[in-house]
Amino acid sequence: MNEKTLTTEENKMGYAKMFPLIMSMSLPAMFSMTIMALYNIVDSIFVGRLSDGVNALEATSYAYPLQMLMISFAVGTAVGVNSLISRRLGAGNQKEADLAATHGILLALFTWILFVAIGIFAVKPFLLLYGCKGDVLNYGVQYLTVVLCFSGFSMIQVSIEKSLQATGDMIFPMLFQLAGAITNIIFDPLLIYGIGPFPELRVMGAAIATVFGQFVGMVFSVITLFVHKNKVKVTFKNFRLNGETIKNIYAVGFPSIIMQSISSIMIIGFNAILSAYHSAVTVLGVYFKLQSFVFMPCFGLNQGILPVMGFNYGAKNKKRLYSAMKCGMLVALVIMIIGTALFMLIPDKLLSLFNDDPNLVSVGVPAFRTICLCFIPAALGIIFISLFQATGKGVRALIISFTRQLIFILPVAFILSRFFPLNTVWLAFPIAEIMSLILAVFLFIQLAKTDFKKLDNNG
């Protein structure tokens, strides 16, 4: 089938030229995900400038894994919704696509209840496991309690974003993120430092600014969903929960939740390994917030290519499925090469954005230069994970992430920490990423010889 010039949004994922399509789909999401990274990094920059900024940064570093866990549940469920919607649209089944979007909203609300319970009952015991005390403990409890108990705003917004992205709409999700991030940036200094009529709330002020930004983004997304004309419709009129729809959502969503939660578990384990070195824990926390500006554009790229690959897999078009994968890998490599250069050339300047404590810088500079060696192999691994998710092979994506962040990285880091100096522990990151990429290639070759072989080669 020859390339066609079609005007409707419904057709573009099946027939538009691939590279322009990938960029038009991905750029808004890449920008949106970069904006998302601002939520954590802006908080940390402002609290790091407090009089006891080192303690505040350490507290937010210990708090970061639970915050990531919340995001993992929100995004993982929404990825399942996104994948199901795009596949149903590719197969021409509008009714089931709408049903998936409606279920996504309700599943977000159910997930929120879980994290309210964690925010109320589990935050302090979690921090005490690390031996946190004094200001570090108080700051961590304040921050996490607010962020987790009011996480429903973010969960609903993420569900709506992924539903719209599955239809090829990348602009409104970007605007939702932008509205929330701008709100957060404005209110962070006002509430942290107590500017003008606002009270000085310090670390709690950062948490309140974050959830208020998420509230603004959620309101914007809900209005857009029900007022704007979209290619997927959410309605609760005569609605009943459908077990088959929930099963199909979590066939991809549950492995995605586990896969992204593994990052949280990995950081918890890494923090435990580094707990004897308080500066190293803080450096790791700062690193994960800075590296989000490298990885988030790649995750945004995934959001752009996932519906394209899902649509063409549903349409049984192998040529376009593979073309989307190759374009994604090329763009991801460019992003990661730029990120590697920045972490190699100016690690001291990146650290000084948060705090210029000499001990923090002395530990952080070699750490950044070593960890960033994982960026380039990660670029390819991320695209393979997206391919598996888009085609309903979520278990394979889970296997890659599980082996990389638990089976590989933590044992390697533990061994290095016991027999070598601190600076060698950071080598666990590139070692794990290279090994997981080898596994991803192996799993892809298996699919290429079986499931993908049955697809139509003509596009």
Image (cartoon, helix red, strand yellow):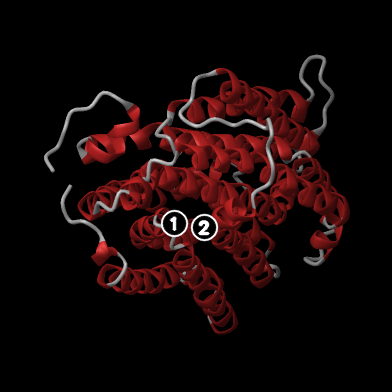
Circle 2 Cα neighbour tier, 10 Å, few/some/many (<14 / 14–19 / ≥20): many
Q: Is residue 217 above or below residue 257?
A: above
For the point 52% across and 49% down, the residue is 79
Question: Residue 221: horizontal and vertical position, in percent?
Answer: 60, 26
Q: Is residue 215 left or right of residue 413?
A: right
Does 206 sit above or below residue 132? above
Q: Is residue 182 visible?
A: no
Which residue appears at 84% of the width and 58% of the height? 122
Residue underneath mark 2? 252
Give SS at disc 2.
Answer: helix
| Badge 2 amino acid | Val
Residue drawn at point x = 65 percent, y = 29 percent: 218
Residue 359 x/y as whole percent: 61, 56
Q: Residue 266's image quarter?
A: bottom right
Find the distance from the CA under tag 2 to the CA under tag 1: 6 Å
Residue at 37%, 45% in the rendered image: 91
Mark drawn on residue 389: 1
Residue 47 placement, left or right of 79:
right
Indicate the quadrant where residue 431 lies. bottom left
Q: Tags 2 and 1 in contact by the CB under 8 Å rule? A: yes
Residue 281: where, in percent of width, then height?
A: 65, 60
Identify which residue, 74 or 198, lies in the foreground. Answer: 74
Q: Residue furthest front?
A: 238
Q: Nearer the viewer, residue 445 or 197?
A: 445
Provide residue 135's location: percent of width, then percent of height. Answer: 84, 49
199, above or below 208, in the image: above
Q: Residue furthest left?
A: 2
- Is 266 or 356 nearer to us in this picture? 266
- Mark 1: amino acid: Gln
